[in-house]
Image (cartoon, grey):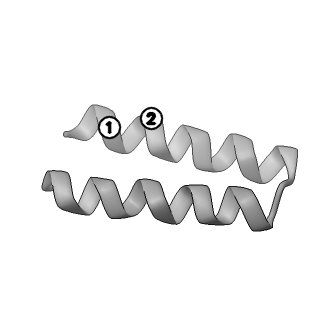
């Protein structure tokens, strides 16, 4: 993944966290975000 795709992925995650503020969803997207950052 390039830094640009990671940047857009972070925006995508925060967009969902803002509109779908659910604890389970937040945990899932947080883990996905951390996983994607580690892959970089």
Q: How many marks?
A: 2
Residue matched to label 2: 34
Q: Residues within 10 Å of mark 1 (few under 14, many from 20)?
A: few
Density class for disc 2 (Cα within 10 Å; few <14, some 14-19, many ≥20) is few
* Circle on res. 28: none
Q: Residue at x 29, y 54 (%)?
A: 6
Seen at 66% across and 47% down, the residue is 28
| Residue 15 pos. (x, y %) | 61, 65
Which residue shows up at 73% across the image and 46% down it? 26
Residue 30 coordinates in the image, percent (x, y):
59, 40
How far across and how far down the image is residue 11, in percent?
A: 46, 60
Name the secondary structure under disc 2: helix
Q: Quadrant of the C terminus?
A: top left
What residue is disc 1 on? 37
Q: Residue 31 at what x, y percent from top left?
A: 56, 38
Q: Nearer the viewer, residue 12 or 28?
A: 12
Q: CA distance from mark 1 to mark 2?
A: 5 Å
Q: Is residue 6 above or below residue 34?
A: below
- Whether residue 19 sits left or right of residue 8 in the image: it is right
Residue at left offset 73%, top offset 59%: 18
User: With 32 as the anchor, is 29 left or right in this view?
Assistant: right
Check the image and report above or below for 5 versus 32.
Answer: below
For this orientation, the residue located farthest to the left is 2
Q: Name the residue at the right extreme.
A: 22
Q: Is residue 24 left or right of residue 8?
A: right
Q: Are marks 1 and 2 in contact (CB under 8 Å)?
A: yes
**Label 1 SS:** helix
In the rendered image, which quarter contains the N terminus? bottom left
């Amino acid at each position: 993944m390039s830094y640009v795709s990671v940047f857009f992925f972070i925006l995508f995650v925060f967009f969902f966290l803002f509109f779908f503020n659910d604890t389970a969803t937040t945990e899932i997207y947080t883990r996905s975000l951390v996983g994607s950052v580690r892959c970089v």
